Image (cartoon, rainbow, N blue to C red):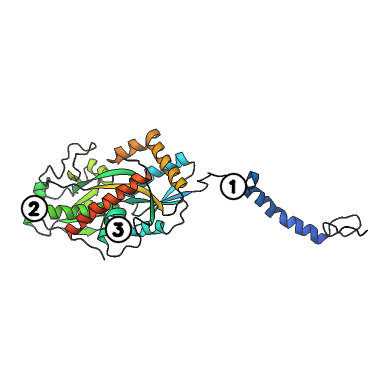
Amino acid sequence: MPRPAPSAPVDSPSGRLSAAASRRLLLSLPALAAAALLWPAGGARAQGAWPTKLITVIVPFPAGGTTDIVARLAGQALSQELGQQVVVENKPGAGGNIGAQQVARSAPDGYTLVMGTVGTHAINPALYKKMPYDHLKDFAPISRVANVPNILVANPSQPYKTVQELIAYAKANPDKVSFASSGNGTSIHLAGELFKTLTGVRMQHVPYKGSAPALADLMGGQTSIMFDNLPSAIGFVRAGKLRPIAVTTAKRSPELPEVPTVAESGVPGFDASSWFGLLAPAGTPPAVIKRIDDALLKAMATTDLKKKIEAQGGEPSAETPAQFAAFIQSETAKWAKVVQASGASVD
């Protein structure tokens, strides 16, 4: 009967490994150990383990603006609820289109999200002649995070303190009043265009790549006024660095109850606010979308996220993905009419 073949090369009848075989075995041990660590118990990856790594929220505007503020507050809360670090990455440009486009093209695995705005997901589709993404088809809505009023603020050196004084000055000095914005097509820009349409004044629009640089130039006297989001402007208002003239919502803000609305100041029908919400790339598994939405709902109910948003002048909001999707549809129709009426357009 023939002898069975040895399981490894031997260098003597005693069955000891040859020198070459010993070297091969030693070299393979680290790889085998690494594989054992990566392979889950039971031979299969545990189900429902998402998230297993860092999550990135893209902010399509510079740091310091309201979108950035809301994203960082939400990111801190989600880190606690999801057990994974959530980081914010700023990708400004083209009225938010550059950052939103990056997320639209990202892997649909829940690890790259965008803090969308009324600009990126309602106004821009009507304002820009060419869009780098489809705001309805390329994203999976998760939930709104906050609704935010805009506030009309002026450099304290300007001669007007009320809406009516501003209108009178602008009519007496056509194109002398310049209004800053965080970029073409943002709610801040469109609020100014709506003001021009309803009052008949002529003002010069000066777009910036975000709210922070726009505010810096406004305080520096390079521009006259701004219809900024309240969270990014409220600190400067309280510090006396900006003069509050009016809020742009139908009701006064609880954070600045002494500041009147534009409508009650003699411009009936004026209502322009902003909103911010999380979206994932289209095709992200529904279970992952629900996991993020559930974490946000829990954060709103059990942490100080709600209080922090309110302290910034915002109104906390959390809803189901279906509700957020329907809201985006309605906002798209609303702002398309405003853009058309204003005649604003961006190539």
Q: Quadrant of residue 92?
A: bottom left
Q: Is residue 251 above or below residue 56?
A: above
Residue ID for mark 1: 45
Separation of marks 3 and 2 at Cα, in angstroms: 29 Å
Q: Is residue 143 in sight in this rendering? A: no
The answer to whether 310 appears left or right of 279 in the picture is: left
Separation of marks 1 and 2 at Cα, in angstroms: 68 Å
Q: Position of residue 321 (x, y in %)?
A: 37, 45
Please rate how many residues cluster around mark 2, counting C-alpha atoms within 10 Å: few if below 14, some from 14 to 19, many from 20. Answer: some
Ranked by sequence position, the earlier of labels 1 and 3 is 1
Front tag of 1 and 3: 1
Front tag of 1 and 2: 1
Q: Position of residue 266 (x, y in %)?
A: 9, 45
Ranked by sequence position, the earlier of labels 1 and 2 is 1
Q: Position of residue 119 (x, y in %)?
A: 28, 54
- Amino acid identity at mark 3: Gly
Residue at image x 45%, y 43%? 291
Q: Position of residue 338 (x, y in %)?
A: 20, 55
Residue ID for mark 2: 169
The answer to whether 268 appears left or right of 292 in the picture is: left
The reply to whether the C-beta atoms of the residues labelled 1 and 2 are less than 8 Å apart is no
Residue ID for mark 3: 95
Separation of marks 1 and 3 at Cα, in angstroms: 41 Å
The quadrant in which the N terminus is found is bottom right
The quadrant in which the C terminus is found is bottom left
Q: Quadrant of residue 320?
A: top left
Q: Nearer the viewer, residue 216 or 127?
A: 127
Disc number placed over residue 211 in the picture, else none: none
Residue at image x 30%, y 65%? 130
Please rate how many residues cluster around mark 3, counting C-alpha atoms within 10 Å: few if below 14, some from 14 to 19, many from 20. Answer: many
The answer to whether 225 appears left or right of 301 in the picture is: left
- Amino acid identity at mark 2: Tyr
